[in-house]
Image: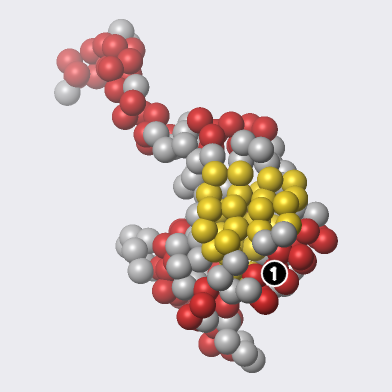
Amino acid sequence: MSQVKTVSGRGVPVVGNDIDTDRIIPARYLRCVTFEGLGDKAFADDRTQATGQHPFDRTEYQGANILVVNGNFGCGSSREHAPQALAKWGIQVIVGESFAEIFFGNCLAMGVPCVTAEPDTIKMLQGILQENLQAPITVDLEAMQVHCGDIQAPVSMGEGPRKMLTTGTWDSCGQLVAQVDQIRATAAKLPYLEWAAAMG
């Protein structure tokens, strides 16, 4: 099981409130059989319609792994393709003012932390990342801090999700694999499984 405690790298700012899941990954890309290749389609329409170059298209932001956003990010439909597209693009952590609840849950199920910070902090972070496109940034889930340039500021996340990430228990499949012997032992004690085998 993979623990998520500290993530460092480079940041990419996407400015704007109420960026919904249809903007993160347009509906026409939901027909895919797997999530592979969705990274290239993240913000597809925004990138096409942008008056300037969208951050996800800028050479300087390629390889960035920490997304900095504003309020109510990931609102709209509950499609899990949205966090999958961001993760396939390379995003490992999202720092924002606030997140839609289902989007937050979908990210947590993938081990992608969504931490919140005060609007002034987000504005400063986005400003640094717009001025210095290679600025290093770190999100520390143990200290609950974000570091970027000269800024060191607190971030927030519920204690339950934070513990799930830092202990690795966010990974439900990993937990099942790790506990396979206990699962088999419990299954062997269930009388209805023997009955089902006899009936089969």
Give the quarter of the figure containing the N terminus: top left
Q: How packed is label 1: few (under 14 Cα within 10 Å), some, or many (20 or more)? A: many
Residue 73 occupies which quadrant of the picture?
bottom right
- Residue nearest the viewer, comparing 8 with 42: 8
Give the quarter of the figure containing the C terminus: top left
- In percent of width and height, residue 186 lies at 33, 12
On the question of residue 63 being in view, the answer is yes
**Pointer 1 residue:** 128
Residue 182 occupies which quadrant of the picture?
top left
* Colour setup of the view: secondary structure
Secondary structure, mark 1, is helix
Residue 127 occupies which quadrant of the picture?
bottom right
- Residue nearest the viewer, comparing 200 with 83: 83
- Locate residue 84 relative to residue 14 in the image: left or right: left
> Which residue is depicted at the point 47% across and 73% down?
62
**Amino acid type indicated by mark 1:** Ile
On the question of residue 102 being in view, the answer is no
Query: Which residue lies most toward the right here?
Result: 120
Query: Which residue lies most toward the bottom here?
Result: 51
- In percent of width and height, residue 86 lies at 50, 63
Above or below residue 141? Residue 151 is: below
- In percent of width and height, residue 6 lies at 54, 44
> Which residue is depicted at the point 72% across and 47% down?
155
- In percent of width and height, residue 197 lies at 19, 18
Above or below residue 121? Residue 62 is: below
- Locate residue 88 relative to residue 119 in the image: left or right: left
- Residue nearest the viewer, comparing 28 with 56: 56
- Locate residue 31 relative to residue 81 in the image: left or right: left
> Which residue is depicted at the point 51% across and 30% down?
167
